[in-house]
């Protein structure tokens, strides 16, 4: 849902508001800090697609001296920069499709759970067993127990932008 | 979730014909995408949770306000006045004073069980077979005959009277103790627990931590089962009292309605007996003198010795102190009204307010004085007692003049007299135990979100546990997504056993198993097979739609106030306001502490240049109301906004629990409500309202029918 903004200033201010809104949803003590473990969720919910490494780097930058907390004062400018620079843009659907097709080496049009699980838990930024189980429940066709990746991509519409 | 073991055999890395680097890149992309997707779902789930919880707590607060209003009326109207008669019976403890007279009243012997009855027959003394039979019967949706209900309850009452305030339990090597939290009428959860864990027995001791009733549809069945097991295994089954084991709360949250609906002839008696039983439920359980189990929690003044000594049955309802007729004009001791006004500058809300700027919270306190912890009504009174009362009386349509109470009622209960310091202290202990919630910050502040008890901090936990030489506090009272949650350095554990509490898929339930090492182990579950099969996305979506429906209803019933609030930001009447002002105005009116900016995309379809066309938005909330001919439209809105309060007042007035009230009582109900809300409602408007429903020709109004006719329906609700 695009909002056409007349000025750069207004854009920055709007970005700040969005960041604050997302941040405050996790600020349980209403003291402008959130638990560091929630940062991933906050960043993702702002429409960004960082990798785990990106997240770790970001956290290292903004965490308050290993307290396990992150303060809005540090988070806000760092996050605003990311949003304004479009640093972790969404993955276009066609690229994602290609990624699935790469893994589907036999070009079947689907992936078997074990195939996908192998990659997810052995390659890249590994999934935990729990993440893997959840992913299979979410993505696999219940009757055939196969992952029809083309269908998934079109079905899983993400929410409107915050 | 299925624990599928990943099999490596099928897909051997050696067979990959794709360059490894490409595969890795592909995997990275997919992982990144998927984690983002899950995180966004999580965000939505949290918001949904906040919506449900804030509406729930606002409802509780609302009821306490209403109840305090009654207390106010009780103090300031003369004994003979009609409005006092309407409600005074809810403040009466006992019409009959002696237990022996009660026994006669509750006697089941005269009740015949007809041959046509197909439900279970019970014999006493209760046996394991008897209770098992009862469980089976309820599983098959049978109903227990009123005779057996009264008999079982009678036996329970007798047993509870000899139990101490605090159950002492010992965990020994062979027996693990099972601890369950809130059930709230969810029979399927109790049956699931029994299925997974086994029925209570001397080898399988159980502790149930309160809130057995209200909200769910099978509160009575749960009570009967638990009481049944209590009778068979009094040393191995332990029941704590929860804040919903309270007849005043039951008026609003469905238990009263459930009992009267299921037992039309004997419902009233059953409810009265349950009132007594609730007051006799123990307040706490302690395991091995190390683990304390209470329903709500503690406060900085919690003292188990005091708790051990109180006459717990005096506290029929935790909402009021035991003695209310005071000599020489001291006020009714209702919850929190006589606290010192030690206001926290900003309320520590459980729900995490997005618009938590200082002006908003100050406004909240000024506008509301609804918060019981801010200006108490008595201090407010001191300013202009005469004017305030005159105005209220005039609005209520009562024409007797104010006269200060100089003596108690002639037919008051024999225990009336001045409330002593000790009594109030004891009462506070009990309220705190049943209503409090933990908070993250240190300290102990009044719980103004719920309207009763405290918020207590980790320092209070340490102090109280230390003082009593305890190592763990187990409590319930708050719904948790995973069914349980630790806090305060794992010294406090919340356990909640009603799964799908807010909606199908909203949360799991859990119970605890604990052996002699006193280490809690958790078993989680979720009743209803359908939600197991839902994908993550589907179950979040389902719950979310339900929460948004509830929220839209709240918005709808406040639409006049919302429009006024929006117009304050729109002095030139453009019909549009900025998103920020929209969020701020909405929070001001609804006061739910919700993240409106985050919710905005779900609530407002169209914005242009960051502006909301608010009139159109209100129109598009797509809630229908029944097409009723009522002369005064504002009365409808009052109706919707105060749906629960109205129903509560109806049920209070309906003294014989017939479900019917006379037209005159209907009229008086509205007068009471209008006084409480400080607004005028004309007699004509009330008469119109009465006529818009097809009432019985005998001049009485069916409460259920009336409430049903005004239920809001969300147009977007389908499938």
Image (cartoon, rainbow, N blue to C red):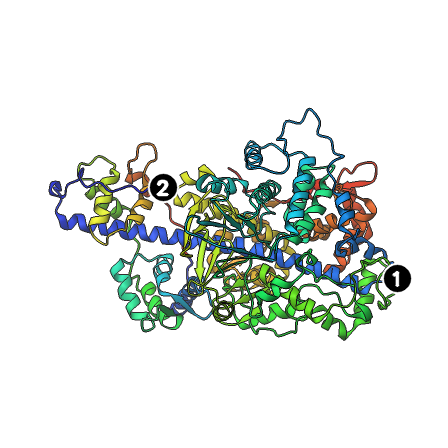
Residue at horizontal 88%, vertical 62%? B400
Q: Residue B92 carries which label?
A: none
| Residue pointed to by mark 2 | A155
- Residue at the top extreme of this rendering: B115
Residue A149 drawn at (x, y percent): 28, 40
Q: Is residue B441 above or below residue B295?
A: below
| Chain letter of disc 2 in the image | A
Q: Name the one closer to the observer, A25 or A3.
A: A25
Q: Are marks 1 and 2 on the same chain?
A: no
The percent position of residue B630, horizontal first and vertical second, equals 75, 46
Pinpoint residue A10: horizontal percent, then vertical percent.
42, 67
**Element under disc 2:** helix
Label 2 crowd bin: few (<14), some (14–19), many (20+), radius 10 Å = few
Is the N terminus of chain B in the top left, top right, bottom left or bottom right quadrant?
top left
Q: Which of B190 and A127 is in front in this view?
A: B190
Q: Considering depth in this image, is A89 or A76 the residue closer to the camera?
A: A76
Q: Give the label on residue B400, or none.
A: 1
Judged left or right of residue B410, residue B211 is left
Q: Which quadrant of the structure image shows residue B108?
A: top right
Distance from label 1 to label 2 (Cα)? 68 Å
| Element marked by disc 1 | loop
- The subunit carrying tag 1 is B
Q: Residue at x 24, y 61 (%)?
A: A53
- B654 with respect to B63 (left or right): right
Does residue A63 appear in the picture of this structure?
A: yes
- For label 1, count other residues whose C-alpha is less than 10 Å away and answer few (under 14), some (14-19) or many (20+): some
* Vertical comparison of B678 with B668: above or below: below
Q: Evaluate whether residue B360 shows in this view.
A: no
Q: Which of A44 and A12 is in front in this view?
A: A44
């Amino acid at each position: 849902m695009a909002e056409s903004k007349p000025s750069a200033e207004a854009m920055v201010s709007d970005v700040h508001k969005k960041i604050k809104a997302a941040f405050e949803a996790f600020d349980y003590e209403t003291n402008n800090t959130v638990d560091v473990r929630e940062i991933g969720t906050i960043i993702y919910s702002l429409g960004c697609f960082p990798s785990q490494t990106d997240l770790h780097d970001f956290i290292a930058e903004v965490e308050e001296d290993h307290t396990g907390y992150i303060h809005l004062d540090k988070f806000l400018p760092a996050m605003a920069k990311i949003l304004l620079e479009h640093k972790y843009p969404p993955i276009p659907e066609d690229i994602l499709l290609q990624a699935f097709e790469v893994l589907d080496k036999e070009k079947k049009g689907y992936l078997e759970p074990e195939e996908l699980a192998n990659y997810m838990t052995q390659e890249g930024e590994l999934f935990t067993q729990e993440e893997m189980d959840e992913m299979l429940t979410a993505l696999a066709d219940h009757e055939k127990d196969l992952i029809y990746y083309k269908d998934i991509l079109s079905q899983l519409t993400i929410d409107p932008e915050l | 979730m299925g624990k599928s073991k990943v099999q490596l055999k099928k897909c051997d890395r050696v067979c990959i014909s794709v360059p490894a680097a490409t595969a890795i890149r592909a995997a990275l992309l997919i992982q990144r995408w998927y984690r983002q997707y899950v995180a966004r779902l999580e965000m939505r789930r949290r918001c949904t949770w906040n919506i449900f919880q804030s509406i729930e707590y606002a409802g509780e607060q609302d009821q306490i306000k209403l109840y305090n209003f009654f207390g106010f009326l009780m103090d300031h109207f003369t004994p003979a006045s009609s409005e006092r008669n309407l409600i005074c019976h809810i403040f009466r403890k006992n019409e009959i004073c002696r237990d022996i007279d009660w026994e006669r009243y509750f006697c089941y012997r005269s009740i015949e069980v007809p041959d046509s009855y197909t439900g279970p027959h019970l014999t006493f003394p209760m046996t394991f077979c008897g209770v098992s039979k009862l469980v089976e019967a309820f599983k098959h949706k049978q109903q227990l005959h009123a005779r057996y209900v009264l008999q079982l309850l009678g036996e329970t009452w007798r047993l509870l009277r000899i139990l101490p305030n605090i159950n002492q339990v010992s965990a020994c090597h062979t027996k693990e103790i099972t601890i369950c939290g809130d059930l709230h009428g969810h029979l399927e959860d109790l049956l699931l627990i029994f299925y997974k864990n086994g029925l209570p027995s001397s080898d399988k001791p159980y502790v149930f931590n309160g809130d057995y009733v209200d909200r769910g549809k099978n509160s009575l069945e749960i009570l009967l089962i638990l009481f049944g097991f209590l009778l068979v295994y009094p040393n191995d089954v332990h029941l704590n009292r929860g804040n919903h084991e309270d007849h005043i709360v039951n008026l609003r949250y469905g238990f009263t309605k459930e009992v009267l609906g299921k037992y039309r002839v004997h419902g009233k008696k059953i409810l009265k007996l349950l009132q007594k039983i609730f007051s006799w439920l123990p307040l706490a359980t302690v395991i091995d003198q190390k683990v304390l189990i209470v329903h709500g929690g503690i406060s900085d003044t919690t003292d188990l010795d005091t708790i051990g000594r109180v006459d717990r049955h005096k506290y029929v309802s935790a909402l009021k102190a035991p003695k209310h007729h005071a000599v020489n004009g001291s006020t009714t001791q209702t919850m929190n009204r006589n606290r010192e006004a030690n206001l926290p500058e900003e309320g520590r809300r459980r729900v995490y307010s997005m618009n938590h700027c200082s002006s908003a919270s100050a406004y909240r306190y000024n506008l509301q004085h609804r918060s019981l912890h801010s200006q108490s009504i008595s201090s407010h009174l001191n300013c202009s007692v005469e004017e305030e009362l005159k105005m209220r009386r005039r609005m209520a349509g009562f024409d007797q003049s104010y006269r200060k109470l100089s003596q108690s009622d002639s037919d008051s209960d024999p225990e009336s007299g001045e409330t002593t310091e000790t009594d109030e202290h004891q009462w506070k202990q009990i309220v705190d135990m049943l209503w409090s919630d933990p908070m993250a910050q240190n300290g102990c502040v009044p719980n103004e979100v719920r309207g009763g008890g405290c918020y207590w901090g980790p320092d209070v936990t340490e102090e109280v546990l230390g003082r009593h030489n305890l190592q763990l506090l187990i409590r319930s009272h708050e719904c948790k997504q995973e069914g349980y949650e630790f806090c305060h350095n794992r010294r406090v554990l919340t356990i909640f056993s009603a799964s799908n509490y807010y909606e199908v898929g909203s949360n799991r339930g859990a119970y605890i198993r604990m052996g002699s090492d006193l280490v809690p182990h958790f078993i989680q579950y979720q009743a209803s097979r359908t939600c197991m099969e839902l994908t993550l996305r589907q179950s979040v979506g389902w719950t979310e739609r339900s929460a948004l429906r509830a929220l839209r209803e709240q918005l709808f019933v406040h639409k006049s106030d919302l429009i006024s609030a929006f117009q304050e930001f729109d002095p030139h009447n453009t019909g549009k306001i900025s998103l920020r002002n929209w969020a701020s105005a909405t929070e001001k009116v609804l006061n739910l502490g919700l993240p409106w900016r985050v919710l905005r995309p779900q609530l407002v379809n169209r914005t242009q240049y960051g502006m909301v066309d608010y009139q159109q938005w209100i129109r598009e909330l797509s809630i229908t109301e029944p097409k009723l001919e009522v002369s005064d439209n504002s009365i409808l809105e009052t109706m919707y906004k105060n749906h629960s309060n109205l129903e509560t007042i109806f049920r209070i007035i309906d003294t014989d629990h017939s479900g019917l009230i006379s037209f005159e009582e209907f009229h008086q109900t509205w007068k009471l409500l209008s006084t409480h809300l400080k607004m005028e409602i004309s007699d004509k408007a009330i008469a119109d309202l009465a006529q818009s429903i097809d009432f019985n020709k005998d001049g009485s109004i069916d409460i259920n029918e009336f409430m049903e006719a005004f239920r809001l329906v969300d147009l977007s609700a389908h499938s």
